Structures are given as structure tokens and as C-alpha cells.
Image: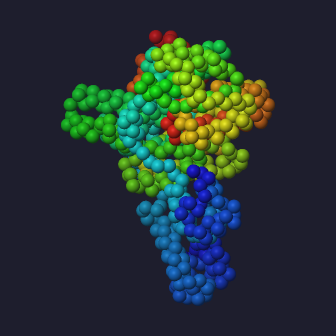
Amino acid sequence: MAAKKLRRAQLSQEMCERLSRYQITTCQDFLCLSLLELMKVTGQSYYEVQKLLCKVSRACAPKMQTAYEMKLRKSVNPSSAFLSTTLHSLDRVLHGGVPCRSLTEITSPPGCGKTQFCIMLSVLATLPVSMGGLDGAVIYIDTESAFSAERLIEIAANRFPTYFDSDEKLLCMSRSIHLYRELTCCSVLKRIMSLEEEIISKKVKLIIIDSVASVVRKEFDTKLQGNLAERSNFLTRGASVLKYLAEEFSIPV
Amino acid sequence: MQREVGTLPLAPALRARLAAAGFQTAQELLDTGPCGLSKEIGISREEALEALQVVRRECHGNAARTAGGSGATRKCTALELLEEEQTQGFIITFCSALDNILGGGVQLTKITEICGAPGVGKTQLCMQLAVDVQIPECFGGVAGEAVFIDTEGSFMVDRVVDIAAACVQHCHLIAEAQQEEDHRKALETFSLENILSHIYYFRCRDYTELLAQVYLLPEFLSEHSKVRLVVIDGIAFPFRHDFEDLSLRTRLLNGLAQQLIIIANDHKSAVVLTNQMTTRIGQSQSTLVPALGESWGHAATVRLIFHWDNSQRLATLYKSPSQKESTIAYHITCHGFRDVQPPAVTHSTEGTELNPRKRPRTEEERQ
């Protein structure tokens, strides 16, 4: 949205050409300037510049929805609002399960079972909707190399013996879990950025990142001066992309 | 009418031409007329007419201001302000201790900033306020609508439903106890669907969308004149990443603050912002301070800092022009933002203590 070219914001051709001479090509560049700068750059009067500003803002402003419309939309399709974890007390506390359209963070000291929980959620996501799953593929970004495919099969076979009665079903399930091993912050970020197309092509319904902290702690030493800013930069950028993916595709992350 | 041509809000090229032709004051322009102007400077008659209209609008605006007229002028006596402030409503928060230290609740026409660590209850308070602003006047509310601009995606509709249901319940109880006609009438319109349909939600993904939305807000607010609350949940989030140029960030934030002040004043609505906390690394220790830097601290009129103390949530009034600094404890229940039971009584002597650690101990002693 920010990188939207001014051409598509319905500004006139000559205005766009004039602005591009000052290296202003996207809505972001336009909105970052003060009114006086805009006047100088566009050569228009004060009132005209305000009208231009409104036009450009309308091109990138978000759409309005009332809370009521949001609630109606949710109640129309209740089953797609959560991924049930099949742990009844946890589901009760979470009001249904791991929520779609938002980020959920699982933290704990080592050895408590985070990776096991993630593996179980991957199995659950591949189940059909009638069994409480999301009937889709899973993207698993593993930074600690802790994912074990054998454990995946073990969980699936033991937890849902009636469903996974044949080897074929197990193979099919494991095929829909896409595992990516990323070992540096840079590659994790690049992977997150490239996820949008994969989600559409592979019909992904769940994204798991295990774990964010390990790769960040390896690379950024918080005792050094500049690292804190860089680290939070990386984290917030990743977080905003993940939030966008979660909301856009209505999936849990 | 002696205004200099260089100060008029015309296009810069036109101004340069006028200066080159020798025009000095606005009166000269008006005397020349469009045809004469177009011949002298070499612009078309339509352009000359447009320029003259701009000049006329400016000068009339000026004249009205110098004559002390109404509307455009922003000056009035302190007495008028006092009367206005006394009749102004507050948006209550359902936590009486917090309302007390704020002087009645969140004030209209002022910017209130809520800072806090993640998970301490900032978004909860924003959702509570978005419901509370709609309370009808006979129950002590301002009967307005709310605009919720979300940059972090933490707005949960189900939670708002819970909070709204509790609020409606509360009003029903009051109405039953007092049995007045206008209470009953107000309750007919104060229902769950009405509350939800009067919360206007915008999801801004980055700072460009946020800037665009704030530019469009005055127009939106004139169309929806009943809006009395604008919440921007997470003003820090879009500005904290992808910003190499810190001076640009400061400039954008200051511009944003100015626009919000104008919106708050012109439309008599309260503006509530939430901010994140960041760690400032000092010589030997690190402290938690509100994010976005020192210059942003001047933007908000009232600043509340939410923090934890063991497992108790505390709210500190950090900056306010009319109330003194104090700290109170609050609770978040399934009904929303509430007092800690029993409600904390803020004595004037205890209010001056900024040390949050003292508060729980004194409460225990009293119990």
C-alpha cells in the first residue's frame, strides 16, 4: 500500500512526471513531505495541494468497517475462527483454540514441550474440518533443527488411529507439511517475505516458526551498542509481515 | 489589505512572476483585475481569476480575524474556557480510581497517551473507552461514537462484545434502581448492535496508511459528527522499524501530533494513543521508558504509564496539566477494565508517592 505508485492514485500524468523529477514516485514519498515542500514540488497553491493530499490519502487509506460488521462476519463462519488444540482446558481458556488472523506466541524454558506442541498443531491443521482441523498445508520454519519427521508420524498414528489407518494417509499428511530450515536472521526474514505466494499456491492454513528467539539470540549480542536497534528492527519487521499474512489469509501463525 | 504578495498561498511559480512584475501588496492585485493581471504577467484569464479568488479569500479571512469575528478566530477569554471546561463531559473508564486521578475520566479535546509494557492492558482500556463513550447522557456518558485506528491488529471483536454486554447490563441495573423515564428511553437505543455499529474500525498496516488516514480524518469526522473519541492503538509500532532517518520520523510524528490536536479541538473529541515501552541503556542499568523518543513526550497532554508490580497492574499518571501525579491499581476482569476490590481509596498524602512498591503494602496493612 505504501509503495503504491502515484500513477495509480489517479493523479494526472503531468503531475506524476513532475513529481518523479524530484524522486517522488510512491504514495509514501508524497505523504512524508510537509505542505510547504509539496507546494514547492508540485507548483500548486495551498488549497490545491490540500486537495491533492486528500486524493493521495484516499488512495492508500484503509477501508472502514464497523465493529458490528466484523462480528457478523465472524459469526457467519465460526468454525474457521480457531484451530482447536484438542486440549479441552486450553481451548476453554483460549475461547475456542488458537485464533486465526493473529499471532500466537508460545514461550517456556527449554524442554517443556514447545516443539512437541508445534508438531501436534501441524498434524491437527492437516485434518479435515469435520475433525476440527483446517484441511490445509502447513509451513514450518525450523531454526533449531528440532523437527523430527518420525515423531510426526508417531503422533499422528497414535492420536488419530482411526483416521490415519493406512500408510498412504500418513504419507499424504506429511507431504502437506512443508519444512524450511533457516539458520540466520536474514534468511528467516527472506523466507517470511516470500511466504505470500507459497500460501496461495500450496493452500497453507498454518504457519509455525520454531523458534524466533534462538536465531535472534545467536546473532545479536545485546551488550553491543547498535545491536539493540537492529534486533528490534528485524523483529518488528518480521512481526508486521506475519500479522499481514495472518489477517490476509485468515490463518493462525 | 497591505499583505505582501510573497505571503499569499499561491503557486510558487506564480508568486515569482508577480514579484518579477513588481506587485508588492495584495491590494494592488485586487485593483488590477483579472484581465489586467493576465496581460501584465502573461498568464491566462482563468488562472488570473483563480489567483484573485485565492487572494480575496485570504484577505477576507484576515479581515474577519482582525475584527475579532467568530469562527476563524481562536481567541477567547479564560472565563469562557472555564465555563466550557466545566460543562464538558468525561469518558469514564469504569475504574473509579483511574477516573479519580484523571479528574473525572478521559477528557474531551485533549490527547491522552497510554504507555505500557506488552500485555498490561492498553488495548483493553481502549476497547473499554470505545464502549464507554457511547453511554447515554442520562447515565453520565457523552453519547458519542468512536473511531478505532488499529496498527497492531490486537482488536478482538469478541472481547468488545463482552465489554459492551457488561456495560449494557450495568446501565440496566441503574435504570431499574432509579426508575426514570429517560433512562428507559435511552436504554432502547443502547443495545449491543448499536454499540458495535458505532465503532468505526480502520486497520493501518504501515505508517503511510496511518498518515493517510489521519489526513482524511477531519473529513470523516465532519460526516460523522457524533464521534467523540478517536483511538489510535499502537502509534509506536509502524514507526519503529524501517526508519533509517530519525529526523524524518520526528518530523512526521510532530506533524501527526499537530493534526491530532486540531482534530481534538475542532470536533470536541478525545484522542487516545497507545505507546510501547523501550529499554534505555544507561551507564550501568537499563530502564523502561516510553518509545518514540523525548520529543514525542511533548505531544500528549495527559500521559498514563501502565506497569506491573509483582502481579498487580498499576497505572501512574505521569503527566497532566491539572491533576497531580499518582498511582492506582486496576484489574482486568471478563467484564473489562475495573477497580481492584475493594476500590482503592486515594488519599491526597499517598498520591504524591511515585514509588509503586509502597502501594500494595499499605493496602495490606489496611486490610
Look at the picture and state if A23 lies above or below B131. Answer: below
The picture places residue A11, in percent across and down from the top left corner, at 56, 65
Look at the picture and state if A249 lies above or below A25. Answer: above
Q: In the image, is A156 to the left or to the right of B159?
A: right
Look at the picture and state if B147 lies above or below B100. Answer: below
Give the image quarter of residue A223.
top right
Q: In the image, is B184 to the left or to the right of B234?
A: left
Q: In the rendered view of the protein, which quadrant contains the C terminus of chain A?
A: top right
Q: Is residue B97 among the parts visible in the rendering?
A: no
The picture places residue B93, in percent across and down from the top left corner, at 42, 32
Between A163 and B267, the one lying in front of the other is A163
The picture places residue B202, in percent across and down from the top left corner, at 48, 45
Between B349 and B10, the one lying in front of the other is B10
Visual colour scheme = rainbow
Tell me which residue sits at (54%, 77%) in the image.
Answer: B51
The picture places residue B217, in percent across and down from the top left corner, at 48, 52
Look at the picture and state if B240 lies above or below B310. Answer: below
Q: Is residue B151 among the parts visible in the rendering?
A: yes
Tell me which residue sits at (72%, 28%) in the image.
Answer: A215
Between B58 and B331, the one lying in front of the other is B331
Tell me which residue sits at (46%, 11%) in the image.
Answer: B367
Tell me which residue sits at (54%, 79%) in the image.
Answer: B47
